[in-house]
Amino acid sequence: MTFVDSKQRFSNRVADYIRYRPAYPSALVDLLRKECALLPDRVIADVGSGTGLLSKLFLEHGYSVYGVEPNDEMRAGGEEVLRSYRNFTSVNGSAEATTLDDSSVDLVTAGQAFHWFDPHAARHEFQRILKPCGFLVVVWNDRRISESHFSREYEDLLLRYGTDYTRVKETYPGAAVMQRFFAGNRFHSRELANFQEFDFAGLSGRLRSSSYAPQEGHANYRPMMAELERLFGANQVNGRVRMNYTTQIYFGNLETLGNSR
């Protein structure tokens, strides 16, 4: 399921997204080196790159990255964050139309973005731009909802005040979704631990960065922020709370899929 406004949902959330969204664990690069032949000379297309959270991880390890992002504001944010990396190329494109050349990249990645793609069009486009035996890697940070009182209360807050939280949550890819996308090809899944720690300002920014969080002026905004302050006060330790994640990773080869180049 995708939404008609998916390419614009984050236009007015860029600053909070840059400051407060979780990064990805460095162990992800080690995993991909082992499982996806991610050698030092490999070229990566990070599709739906946003403000560059996943791109930055690969750039820090010396890889060349095309950051493909359709949202002008998010793309500009990524360009600013990653301006010091000479091996980063910002691309005005989308999962369905990257504008990249045929057989030009070794790895296509999608970090916290796959659920916004049109599956059929994206699969065809990824097949087109990947080199033979290239890999697709889908990554996202999944909050561990059930493991603490704080995480359960935060989930309840989203359910109560979010504009379309349930609808967005239902689109997050699981094994069945990935099975359909890989169309019978063999794929693999792995998990890595991840977390963030916040003071109240950081927790507020983390909430505001979400596309389903009501913004100032919306009827739900003030009661949501009041509840967030109560939640923080009840769960903070030394002025901070911890948000735990599982970094979910799916990867596989698209070479033999139907409708290939």
Image (cartoon, helix red, strand yellow):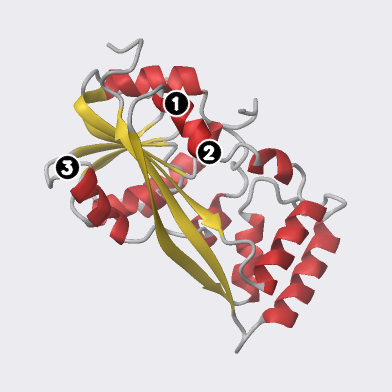
Q: Decide which of 176, 201 is in the foreground and name it.
A: 176
Asked if residue 79 shows in the view, the reply is yes
| Left or right: where 45 falls relative to 9 | left
Percent of width and height locating residue 246: 48, 58
In the displayed structure, would residue 154 be above or below residue 215? Answer: below
Q: How far apart are marks 3 and 1 (CA)?
A: 21 Å
- Residue 22 is situated, as x and y percent measured from the top left of the image, at 48, 60
Q: What element carries label 2?
A: loop
**Residue 232 falls in which quadrant of the image?**
bottom right
Instruction: Indicate left or right for 261 with 114 as reference.
Output: left
Callout 1 amino acid: Phe
User: Which quadrant: the C terminus?
Assistant: top left
10 vs 190, nearest the viewer: 190
- In the rendered view, tell whether residue 26 sits above or below residue 133: below
Q: Mark 1 points at which residue?
A: 181
**What element does badge 1 sit on?**
helix
Q: Name the residue under label 2.
A: 173
Q: Dividing the image into 4 quarters, which one contains the N terminus? A: top right
Is 50 left, or right, of 221 in this rendering?
left
On the image, the x and y values in percent for residue 159 come to 77, 52
| Residue that numbered label 3 is attached to | 37
- What residue is rendered at 16% in x and 40% in y? 42
Q: Can residue 90 be seen in this view?
A: no
Local SS, label 3: loop
Going from the N terminus, do you reach mark 3 or mark 1 first?
Answer: 3
Q: Where is residue 15 in the image (x, y as percent from the top left)?
A: 55, 55
Kind of residue at disc 3: Ala
Q: 67 or 165, which lies in front? A: 165
